Image (cartoon, rainbow, N blue to C red):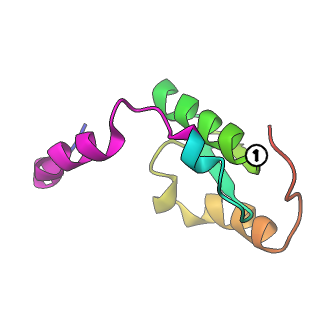
Amino acid sequence: MVPRAGAYTLPYDVVLCGDGRPPADRLGRVAVPTLVVDGGESPPEMRTAAAATAAAVARRYETLPGQDHAVLQNPQALAPLIRSFLGGEGQSRVT
């Protein structure tokens, strides 16, 4: 659910997201190390999009158990994963 204060962004979100599928052709051209993260409690369509994005960029994909789409508001859950990624550990792992 979008709070009323953010409702004005919905038309723009729809335009940017198109049909909701990640643009695999464009993502396949990403040539830098990439970390795709989703939360184990995120809605299924978001998890599907994260998995498709990770498959397209062929980099690292992780699911944070017990987290949802708002994991950015929970830095203590996200920080160890980002530190690991930036430190060069497990760059080639795609799950």
The residue under the point 36% across, 29% down is: 19
* Magenta span includes 4: yes
Location of residue 34 in the rendering, given as x and y in whole percent from the top left corner: 69, 59
Relative depth, front residue between 9 and 3? 9
Location of residue 53 in the rendering, given as x and y in whole percent from the top left corner: 60, 41
* Magenta span includes 73: no
Q: Position of 16 compared to 34: left or right? A: left
The residue under the point 61% across, 34% down is: 52
Location of residue 25 in the rendering, given as x and y in whole percent from the top left corner: 58, 41
The N terminus sits in image quarter: top left
Relative depth, front residue between 12 and 63? 12
Q: Amino acid at mark 1?
A: Ala
Query: How many labels were placed on the picture?
Result: 1
State the image quarter where residue 54 is shown. top right
Our reading of the magenta stretch's main secondary structure is helix
> Does the rendering let one see residue 68?
yes
Residue that mark 1 sits on: 58
The C terminus sits in image quarter: top right
Relative depth, front residue between 49 and 18? 18
Return the residue found at the far top: 44
The residue under the point 56% across, 29% down is: 48
> Does the rendering let one see residue 3?
no
Q: Position of 48 compared to 54: left or right? A: left
The residue under the point 40% across, 32% down is: 20
Where does the magenta region start and end?
3-24
State the image quarter where residue 77 is shown. bottom right
Q: Position of 69 compared to 53: left or right? A: left
